[in-house]
Amino acid sequence: MHLILLFKGYIDMKIGQISHVFPPHIGGIGNYVYRLKQSFENKDNEVTVYTTNYDISNFNNNEKNVIYCKTNFAFVRNPFSFELLKKLKQNHEDIYHLHGYEFLPSLFASIILKNKPKVLTQHGAEIECNDPKIYLLNKIYHPFAQYILENMDMIIALGKKDRDFLLKAFNLSPDKITIIPNGIDINKFKSNKDNNTNFNKKYNLKENSFKVLFVSRLIKTKNAHRLISAVANYIKSKDIEVLIIGPGSVEYIKELRAISDKRIHIIGEISFDELVSAYNISNLFVQLGEWSEGMPTTILEAMACGLPILTTSCGSISDVITDGENGLFIDTPIDEKILVEKIKYFMGNDIKKMSEANKIKVNREFNWDIIADKIYYIYKQILENK
């Protein structure tokens, strides 16, 4: 029976969300936790987020019940915080929701909160990476991941591919893993003509060019440099523009600018309203992450705005995109000439069917209100069975 049909309403709960990052840090996991917090607070529950100040500087903490703990050190973008350990030992919530077994806050929370009801969302399960260091670290960490997963009351996978991997890699009971995809608030992505016009003017974009949009943290494994190099070196048309949006290090952005031409616009970090405009003025969304992508929120946001998708098939993306139906896949590692061929396909073909298919699919399957209700029902079910 569908979970939502069983849902009988919200009850007051004290919920702890444990995440290695949280806004203003930019990234999919932090935004996912933020949306959960908002949804459950709107139903009169008390939600406390335990997180770190990793990669955050000079911000005002105006968000109620968010505990930013000092990061003592970080290894491979994985923060460790003594303060977070102390805060978790003072726990008082009814149930805890962890995010990603690969992150140290999840490991220590699973130990400290051993006898507490716990749920974990795995934001991308299989690490599909050719880096031997990452492969070795993954092997070393496997027993710790096993411990975390075995101590959860329920594990949420974002898609079938992730669920299948978890079952096989960790020999878990099928009853312990459920699939609940990522989701978005569709109403926030409606097009606004004046905002779109202002966005074009501000960033000196052509009105009728074919716009390729790339939205991500600007780090090597997301492959913004591959997209820029492919267009700059192999597509001669003056009617294409590439928009690169997201935060990144000064060094990497400098590298991107060095290989760009006038058709490449490295915009960097922008406001949410401007991001909505970027989606709505673009013609194609490109996602080139190589490993552990989960189900990227940016893909769902682009789909809600009617963009076809060109993406790798990492994580649970294949649960969202069907090759040739609402987008195209590209293999990793990224071959720039193949990338160019696929971009040219979108430039030279009618993509209205793909656009409409994406709008319909997001509305039916990835509406955030439905997603939040399903997760809350899991909390309720676990607490009733304790």
Image (tube, rainbow, N blue to C red):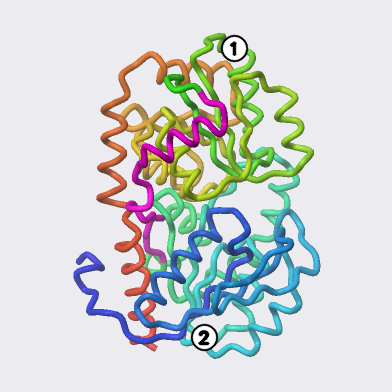
Q: Position of residue 55 (x, y in %)?
A: 72, 58
Q: Position of residue 98 (x, y in %)?
A: 54, 70
Q: Quadrant of the C terminus?
A: bottom left
- Magenta segment: does it hold 181? yes
Q: Nearer the viewer, residue 25 or 92?
A: 25
**Element type at marker 1?**
helix
In the picture, the quarter occupied by the N terminus is bottom left
Seen in the picture, residue 45 relative to 150 is either above or below; the reply is below
Name the residue that disc number 1 marks.
234
Residue 283 percent location from the top left of the image? 41, 27
Q: Nearer the viewer, residue 350 or 175?
A: 350
The amino acid type found where label 2 is placed reads Lys
SS at mark 2? loop
Residue 41 occupies quadrant: bottom left
Magenta residues, start to end: 177-205
What's under tag 1, amino acid-wise?
Answer: Tyr
